[in-house]
Amino acid sequence: MLRAKKVSNWLFHTKLGYFTFVLALFWLKTYYIYLNKFSLGAKGAMQHFLLLMNPIPAAMLLLGIGLFFKGRKSYWIIFTIDTIMSFWLFANILYYREFSNFLSFAIMSTSGSTSDNLGKSIAGITEPTDFLAFLDVLIILIMLIFKVFKIDVRRLKVKVTSLVEVLALTLMGLNLVMSQKDRSGLLTRTFDNNYIVKYLGMNEYALYDGVKTAQNNAEMAKANVSDIKAVQAYIKRHQIADNASYTGVARGKNVLIIHLESFQQFLIDYKWKGEEVTPNLNKLYHESDTISFNNFFNQVGQGKTSDAEMMLENSLYGLSSGSAMASYGTSNTFESAPAILSQEGGYTTAVMHGGEGSFWNRNNAYKQFGYQYFMPLSYYKNKKGYYIGYGIKDKIFFDQSIKYIERLPQPFYLKMITVTNHYPYDIDKKNQSIDKTDTGDSTVDGYVQTAHYLDQAIGELMSYLKKTGLEKNTLLVLYGDHYGISGNHHKAMAQLLDKKSYNDLDNLKQQRVPFMIHMPGLKGGINHTYGGEIDVLPTLLNLLGINDSETIQFGHDLLATNRQQLVAQRNGDFISPKYSKVTGAYYYTKSGKKIKHPSKKQKAELEAMSNEVTTQLSLSDRVIRGNLLRFYHPSWFKPVKAKNYDYQKKISLKRLYAADKKKKSSLWYKNGQKTTQADFSTDAPELKKDSK
């Protein structure tokens, strides 16, 4: 009894007691969040021990700052630090639920370009238990207000406060040593951010990410011409021959790229309650003049859609942290598809997107890519009910885009970015034409409804292309940018796919997204080669017969017969026809069995594949972070000058109409200078209402 009273007096009447109480509550809360809000995959006694203990060192170090002050100020500084750390936890809970990753300084520094409709997304993903991140803050605040803690006005001796900080640093060092022993190269290799948090903790991850961000900024400053030579040497060593039988088969054709937002391959031919979810895409997928890839993977990182665009346009990977388009798109030099096609094929290049032009920094990055025209939301009529999530609904977007499509001088290279099939996968009742799935997972069940809507919109656009004759002279490309259902929904995915279980390898396999190339007369079929978004640019350039010699591209022609078929993931994982790597473990891809005891030959093979992936990613990172393309360009390529482009609607359209008048090759001119708007038919209820 006497001992309990002494402990109570120490906790509630001394500064060290208050510090210990706050630290203990933060530790317990953080451990609860680790277990219930994140999927960190701790395995074995060591990993579980580190997961339990890693919240303590950084919290002790930061809260210990308050011990250097005296009186009431000391207590409130400790409380404020606890509150800030709690907000950091809360923000990561929400971000992780949406993206299966943790916040980075790169993402936060570019939040202005990625926050469109963020409020709605946060509201849609927040759960009541998320606010447990602030439970200790509330408890401490109440105890301070009602004076449960008696303020100890004495200043602690410097050696005592210093000892606390030294102990915190010692524990941090011990944690790092134990972590490195269990997972060698933790901080030096391209691991998933889950590893850093699992082994070291949330606050240590923030420190690690901050240091890495500073290093990236310094890397650009010190980069020089010798760096690009190392990249060139790697590219040259790994060159393979394009498929000559397809070289130039689409020479001079228009290129229309349809960006299928959050669209996964499993939706192709998928039925719900006996109804095809995507009948129009299914038909296109199986047509004899469509090359359809069924082992095509998204390879995005934190930049999601922007990473997909970076790979599509440049054959460069997105970054391990943040968005390359957002962070480097304003100032970097690129050798992108629109610039190459404009210079080598006389193409008119444009992007149409019913969302904000600032999203992912597109209004700046597209200038660096060499896009002559960019039609974002400001080019579209946005009435009540037209906008959903991240832009104009797809059917309305396509309908309003006709007036711009028909004025593009041919040949054109046009990318159209859809948005309706975007999280949180909700769509108003009048646009719902298929039932939700019934997994019970609110994130997953609306996915088929928005995918079905997108498919209907694609069907309407395809009908327009046929009616106007554009289809005959157009290479149509459709691709999914990234997953729609993240790796946090294993149970629901198992139900959708009618599987008894669903593990991390299954999730990697479900990173497949559609990639289809359609053109009348094209020798098509379903192609089983393993590839990814990094391979799109060289594939398209070969089909178009466009010179891309001496360019810096990390992808290869998907139609080449001697492809390595090793598909890198941004976190260092990979998948190939034979082996796959997921979160540090290796598997046989087809059987899904884990390789527990690899032979000596297998070890060498697996290590070589891992090293190849790491090398690709790191070299691509060097190109972007060091802005290395400023030091090199092929002799036939003229570097893009962003100042030559202006996307203001009035100025841009005036320039477009002048170019159209000069070339007289647009659909509008071929239609006797009359609009083809009547050839586009839509059942969008919003437009039917407007026409009445």
Image (spheres, rainbow, N blue to C red):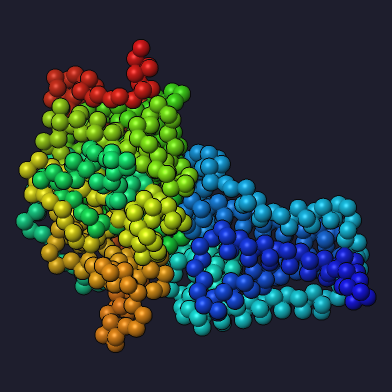
Query: Residue at horizontal 27%, vertical 80%?
Result: 605
Query: Number of labelled discs?
Result: 0
Give residue 373's quadrant in the image.
top left
Q: As drawn, is 455 to the left or to the right of 94?
A: left
Query: Residue at horizontal 29%, vertical 51%?
Result: 265
* Location of residue 501 with respect to 390 vertically, above or below: below
Residue 228 visible within the image: no
Query: Residue at horizontal 29%, vertical 72%?
Result: 588
Give residue 261's quadrant in the image.
top left
Measured as percent of width and height from the top left, residue 251 is found at: 10, 46
Query: Residue at horizontal 36%, vertical 50%?
Result: 496
Measured as percent of width and height from the top left, residue 99 is found at: 47, 53
Residue 412 visible within the image: yes
Q: Quadrant of the C terminus?
A: top left
Q: Quadrant of the N terminus?
A: bottom right
Give residue 105's quadrant in the image.
bottom right
Measured as percent of width and height from the top left, residue 691 is found at: 34, 14
Q: Residue furthest bottom?
A: 600
Of residue 660 and residue 541, the one placed in the foreground of this image is 541
Of residue 91 and residue 355, the one placed in the foreground of this image is 91
Q: As drawn, is 44 to the left or to the right of 603?
A: right
Q: Residue furthest top?
A: 692
* Location of residue 113 with respect to 465 vertically, above or below: below
Measured as percent of width and height from the top left, residue 412 is found at: 20, 38
Q: As drawn, is 525 to the left or to the right of 395?
A: left
